[in-house]
Image (cartoon, grey):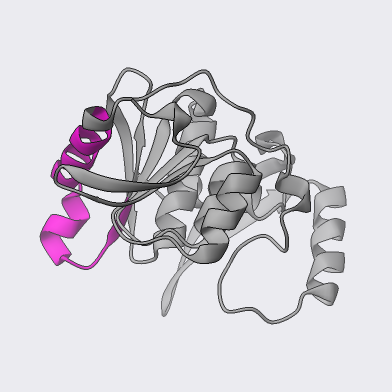
Amino acid sequence: DLEDFALGFSLTEGIIEVPEEIYGTEIVEVENGIRVEMDIASERFQYLKERRRNLTGRTGCGLCGTDSLSQAVRMPPLVMSNPVIHWGFEKMDELQLLKKKTGATHAAAWLDANGNVGLVREDVGRHNALDKLIGALVRQKADRSTGAALVTSRASYEMVQKCGSAGIGMLAAVSAPTALAIQIANEINLTLLGFVRENGHTVYAHPQRLV
């Protein structure tokens, strides 16, 4: 799913603003791995070069701040039931084919408004799995405001920001959120759940979307 990753990463990192700014994607196998080459709009490439000049070191991938996200997630009409969230995690686990073979991957899944798990993307990295999912949702023109992203990891601020930049109104994680993730989720009107296991979970931000 590297095409999905390329699109999702480019959107959530602000490299491009719309999918049409990617003119072509090529997957190239090299000696020590795989390289994804993209042909993007010239103005976006110029912006990327300027951004790289100003980029400071950081410990994880994510957007530089929350100013551009302040209006990213409007309050979607979706209200999702608690049992549906837990069923979604069960279904996601069934669909993690790479995990079944290796036991070493994270997953991100899309739980739509009807309670269906329509997409699952896997990767060694939790951020990459979410980027793949977002890329797949964009490619399929899915309504991202009326569903929930499910992840098999902790909810860091980068994960919240990626969902916010994609217009996703709910993020549910199997592990804990960070304090900054909770703060940003509250600021951008994103419903954030953590420790979703068996029949229990904790709601950290905007519980009004859950019944």
Compare residues 19 and 189 and report the one nearer the observer: 189
Q: Give the residue displayed 61% in from the left and 62% down from the top.
A: 62
Residue 122: percent from the left, percent from the top?
32, 53
178 left or right, relative to 167: left
In terms of image quadrants, where is residue 64?
A: bottom right
Q: Work out whether residue 79 or residue 29 is closer to the camera in this orientation and state it.
A: 79
Q: Position of residue 138 (x, y in %)?
A: 54, 33
Q: Is there any visible trace of residue 143 in the rendered image? A: yes
Q: Is residue 1 above or below residue 147?
A: below
Q: Residue at x 58, y 67 (%)?
A: 61
- Magenta-drawn stretch, dominant element (helix, strand or loop): helix
Frontmost residue, 186 versus 131 = 186
Nearest the camera: 170 or 129? 170
The percent position of residue 146, horizontal first and vertical second, equals 47, 23
What residue is drawn where x is 82% and y is 66%?
Answer: 51
Q: Is residue 140 above or below residue 187?
A: above
Identify the residue at image location x=70%, y=34%: 20
Magenta stretch in the rendered image: 84-107
Q: Is residue 25 visible?
A: no
Give the x, y percent position of residue 104.
Answer: 22, 68
Left or right of residue 109, residue 41 in this image: right
All told, the count of numbered labels is 0
Instruction: Report if residue 156 lies within the magenta region.
Output: no
Judge left or right: residue 89 versus residue 10.
left
Q: Is residue 7 above or below residue 159?
A: above
Q: Quadrant of residue 192?
A: top left
Query: Is residue 95 found inside the magenta-colored segment of the image?
Result: yes
Quarter in which the C terminus is drawn = top left
